[in-house]
Amino acid sequence: MSRWDGIDEFVATAEAESFSQAARRLGLSTSGVSREVARLEERLQTRLLYRTTRRVSLTDAGRAFLARCRALIHDRDEALAAVGEEDGEVKGLLRMTCSSAYGERYVVPAVNAFALAHPKLSLHIELDDTVRDIVSEGFDLAIRFGRLTDSRLIAKRLASRTRRLCAAPAYLARAGTPATIAELETHAGVLGAADTWPFRERTWEGEREIAFKPQGRFRCNSGQAVLDATLQGLGICQLPNFYVDPAIADGRLVPLLEDANPADEGVWAVYPHLRLLPAKVRLLVEHLEKGLG
């Protein structure tokens, strides 16, 4: 029995507070993860986790042991990554996450090209519109937008995106074309997950950011669904440019109040702090910077 047995399972379970979530992260069975943690506790003659029907939590001994195990795993993974760099190969498993629409349109095609160039690399990509905790869930990389606040992560800007206000010609023919932000009060909004739309307003003092709260009878947390409703003529939407640019180009949507568009948002690659960034992450970030930029 290796002295490493159970350590990865323990750390994953402690961070996820769940055997089933830890199993999914590690690609193992739930019973296998639970069994390895139990064997580790037996070997140490110490209880590391409290178990209930809903969740698991750390004992005092488990909390102290977790910090040491994280350091061990980081050192081990950095040593393995260094070997990969020395022999010039990108290999192993890389787990990453990104929002659904942007991931499908831009990130996944770029990652697929990278995978073709590195046949020993395995990829696990999760497209999800929620912001995942990549440290606790064991992701190597995430693609994020806008302002970043998690001090545990390093961020590298890859590209930018713009939010554009637009509507279908049929809707504008029926409801009129707004000339100012204030006139949006009289229009139907096609709403996404956000309650407000950001704009930049120019005054004699300079530019300022403002948030407008649209009203409308359609709301959906899917950008693609918002786009479809707008194309059908249900109202005005504000979406990232990668959703609406093709429809604007062929005349199915009309851009509105372009001078008031908010400042561009950054598209970022984010990854956990490590003393030595694995070659697979570093090279993929460089590839995405070229492709998305």
Image: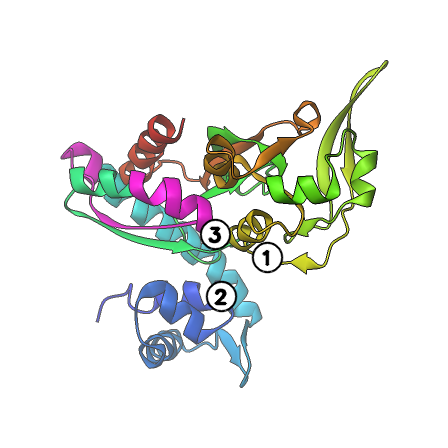
Residue 84 location (% of width, % of height): 20, 39
Q: Residues within 10 Å of mark 1 (few under 14, many from 20)?
A: few
Residue at figure coordinates x 45%, y 76% from the top left: 46
Amino acid carrying label 3: it is Val
Say which quarter of the image contains residue 107.
Answer: top left
Query: Which quarter of the rendering shows the N terminus?
Result: bottom left
Checking the image for residue 16, the label placed there is 2
Disc 1 versus disc 3: distance between alpha carbons? 25 Å
Amino acid carrying label 1: it is Asn
Query: Which quarter of the rendering shows the C terminus?
Result: top left
Indicate which disc, 3 or 2, sits on the residue closer to the N terminus.
2
In this rendering, would 133 be left or right of 255?
Answer: left
Residue beneath label 3, please?
135
Residue at the farthest right position = 204
Q: Residues within 10 Å of mark 3 (few under 14, many from 20)?
A: some
In this rendering, would 213 be left or right of 254?
Answer: right
Say which quarter of the image contains residue 108.
Answer: top left
In this rendering, would 163 be left or right of 67?
Answer: right
Q: Residues within 10 Å of mark 2 (few under 14, many from 20)?
A: many
Q: Is residue 57 magenta?
A: no
Give the residues drawn in magenta, as a range.
84-110
Residue 148 location (% of width, % of height): 59, 38
Kind of element beneath mark 2: helix
Residue beneath label 1, please?
221
Residue at figure coordinates x 31%, y 76% from the top left: 29
Disc 1 versus disc 2: distance between alpha carbons? 26 Å
Q: Is residue 89 magenta?
A: yes
Say which quarter of the image contains residue 10.
Answer: bottom left
Residue at figure coordinates x 22%, y 43% from the top left: 115
Disc number lying in front (1 or 2) = 1
Q: Nearer the viewer, residue 169 or 148?
A: 169
